[in-house]
Structures are given as C-alpha cells and as structure tokens.
Amino acid sequence: MSKGFGNILKQAQQMHSRITQLQEEMAGRTVEASSGGGMVNIVMNGKQEVLSLRIDPEVVNKEDIEMLQDLIVAAVNEAIRKSQEMMTEEMKRITGGLSIPGLF
C-alpha cells in the first residue's frame, strides 16, 4: 500500500512542478481585448498584469469621461476573462481535465 501512496505522491510532485512551470510560461503569454469597437485596447499577460492600454483619441471627450471610463473597465474585464480562460485551458491540459478545487 505504501508503494501506491509513494506513486501518488510522486505524481502530485510532478503535477506541482508542471503547474509552477505553466505559471512562469503564462507570464510570457498575452491576450488582447477591446471595447467600443476597438476604441480601447488592452494587452494583458497570463498573470493578469496589464501590459499596455491604447485609447483611440476620438473617444477622448472632456464632456463624456464616464463613457471612456466604462470602455476601459469593459476592456480590462474582457482581458481578465480571456487570461483566465487561457490559464484554465492550459490547466486542463496538465491535469488531464481533472478539476482540482482551489487550483486557479
């Protein structure tokens, strides 16, 4: 029985190693999201860090700052969703589709 437990422990350690490697890899991968028909563009990495934000000058209007704020929020939220989706897909690949609670 202890041999079986040893194999499980070894597999868990290998999975942990692959997950750590994936987290490092995700920092180098990016997703792009936009809102307002491309008026606001966000590039975010797999660690959900915003790398760049581009705002089309046409959307900048002192009279309607709320619209610009809404477009930025929408683009950031879309980038976060895409980043999480990218991580989820990679985690499925590592875990063989096994859902592990608390793991991302």
Image: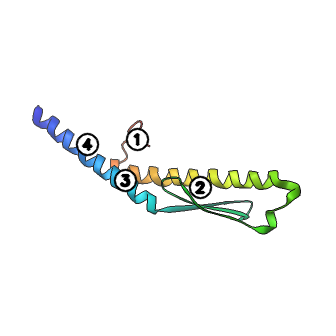
Q: Percent from the top left, x then y, of residue 88?
A: 45, 49
Dot label at residue 79: 2
Q: Percent from the top left, x then y, of residue 61?
A: 85, 61
Q: Percent from the top left, x then y, of residue 32?
A: 58, 62
Indicate left or right for 5 with 65 as reference: left
Dot label at residue 93: 3
Question: How far apart are the alpha carbons under marks 2 and 4?
Answer: 31 Å
Residue designated by label 1: 103
In this rendering, the answer to whether 89 lies above or below 102 is: below
Q: Earlier in the sequence, mark 2 or mark 4?
A: 4
Question: How far apart are the alpha carbons under marks 3 and 4?
Answer: 15 Å
Residue designated by label 4: 12
Q: Locate the N terminus and report the quarter of the image it occupies.
A: top left
- 2 or 3: mark nearer the eye: 2
> Looking at numbered disc 2 in the image, what kind of residue is underneath it?
Ala
Question: How far apart are the alpha carbons under marks 2 and 3?
Answer: 21 Å
Q: Nearer the viewer, residue 47 or 5?
A: 47
Residue at (78% x, 68% y) in the render: 57
Question: How far apart are the alpha carbons under marks 3 and 1?
Answer: 13 Å
Q: Earlier in the sequence, mark 2 or mark 3?
A: 2
Mark 3 neighbour class, 10 Å CA radius: few under 14, some 14 to 19, many 20 or more:
few
Mark 1 neighbour class, 10 Å CA radius: few under 14, some 14 to 19, many 20 or more:
few
Indicate left or right for 16 with 42 as reference: left
